[in-house]
Amino acid sequence: MASKFKELFTNWKIIILIISLIVSLLVIKPSFNVEGVAISAVISNSAASEAGFAIESKLPTKLERILKIDDKEISSVQDYFEVVKTFSLNQSIQLKTNKKLYRLTVKPKFVEKEVVGIEDIGLKIIEAPTSNIRKGLDLAGGTRIILKPQEELTQEQIKYIIDNLKERLNVYGLADLAISEVATLGEERLILVEIAGASEDEIHDLLAKQGKFEAVIANKTAFVGGSDSVNYVCRDRAECSGIDPNRGCQKVENNYVCGFFFHIILSPNAAQQQADITKNIPLVTKNSGRYLSEQIVFYLDSKEVDRLDISESLKGRAETTIVISGSGTGSTYNEAKENALNDMKKLQTVLQTGSLPTKLEIVKSDSISPILGKSFIKNAFIMGFVAMIAVTIIVSFVYKKLEIIVPLFIIQSIEILLILGFAAFIGWNMDLASIAGIIASVGTGVDDLIVFTDEILRKEKETEKYMRSWKQSIKRAFFIIMAAYFTTFAAMVPLWYFGAGLLKGFAITTIAGITIGVLITRPAYAEILKYLTEEK
């Protein structure tokens, strides 16, 4: 028996199974008692980014973790925000992470050049991951939006839109995101945007805007938004952006209107283009001053944002520093001020990142809270456990043999680990659709294992002896299993390509599961079953 046992574990199919299991565990890297909270994103131009915080790796277990703030230990997200609430203006803070020690100073928050509080230090925090299995929006919470271009675009234009949207959302402080192209059966080209920890209201306008900014003088374009024309956009600095001190906030009829301003620096070519347009425009006297007869008009997506008089001193002059202004309205003073600052931020982002080739229509939008995501994870574990127990009970009633039931249960558990290892290796975000795919592949796996078992244990009724040789039985079982495999594979491919991204997780995990089963776990199970039944 010892020699037979040794023969089993030197079988190449069993060796492949063991190696695959070890590799999967190394990739998943399960951890226990992880200290601190993980940093998932660092907002640009924040106190944290200036102190040196940066995301160096996107692997969940390699995310930098905050262990202490000053002398207070941080063991949960709640602990972190409890400490953050105690921060005061210009306070010097010491943050200890699992990598190094940081020091930063809390910045003031300005409105109308007045300090109204303190700024966020610029860190997005999540519970410290205990493995490299990534959680999708269904499990982690966030927003999923599907965008449809209003014009037919080339592959290069689609790629430009995706890169531009990533830049917009990164500039806006939404760094934990995934943007990809998806297709439908009608061959529509759509863009899927998934953002963890952001609400729909924050990003709807930012994504849907084409972002075509134009400054027009005398019906001629002086400059446009984007890096080719705009070298610098002032953001978060009271001296060159914020509520306009000259206009402030005023009550107009039943609403309040607040004006905003911010400075930009044009490229030399854009400044020269503006000078060429203004050099031949005549001057007029207005409000005891001399101005050009034509105003500079700002358009965003073909809608006028504001218009300003052009001073005589700018006639024919290649001025690089330009002041952009606009306004926001609201039913109350605070609402108008907040809307003005939000409009300013969106306009700054569009000027910095440039325009898209076409407008984008939001065709579907979903928002999931992190609390609901935790509930989904709990329910998924319960559902998977119940399914495994139910399968084991049914198989027990049918075969009534431990040498069949135990290997079947172990092989199915290993198969789940291999699927999770594959998902962690390719960086796939596990969502509810992916979990459903794992359950589907495990279900087909049970069918395949039962086919193996029946073929191997089939006997002649009269003689109670094996009906075929082991080789014939396994060959017949593999023929049935491969036919089922290709049928399932063919059914999943359309979901992969034409599921608008929402069913892609289901298709990927199902295909991965059945492929791992056919190539690794089913052959190993056949060898184990052969060994056990022969010994019996």
Image (tube, grey):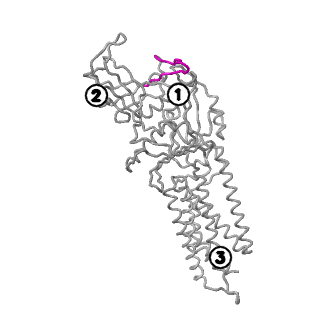
The amino acid type, in three-letter code, at marker 3 is Thr
Amino acid of disc 2 = Gln
Q: Name the residue under label 2.
A: 272
Q: Which residue is tagged 1? A: 339
Residue 108 seen: no
Placement of the N terminus among the 4 image quadrants? bottom right
Where 404 sits versus 438, above or below?
A: below
| Farthest residue, direction top | 288
Q: In which quarter of the view is residue 415 placed?
A: bottom right
- Secondary structure at badge 1 equals helix
Q: Where is residue 493 in the image (x, y as percent from the top left)?
A: 50, 62
Viewer-closest of 296 and 422: 296
Q: Does the magenta stretch include residue 258?
A: yes
- Mark 3, secondary structure of its residue: helix
**Mark 3 highlights which residue?**
453
State how many labels appear: 3
Q: Which residue is drawn at 58% across and 30% down?
A: 93
How far apart, in angstroms, are the residues tagged by discs 3 and 2?
Answer: 81 Å
Mark 3 and mark 1: Cα distance apart in space = 68 Å
Cα separation between marks 2 and 1? 34 Å
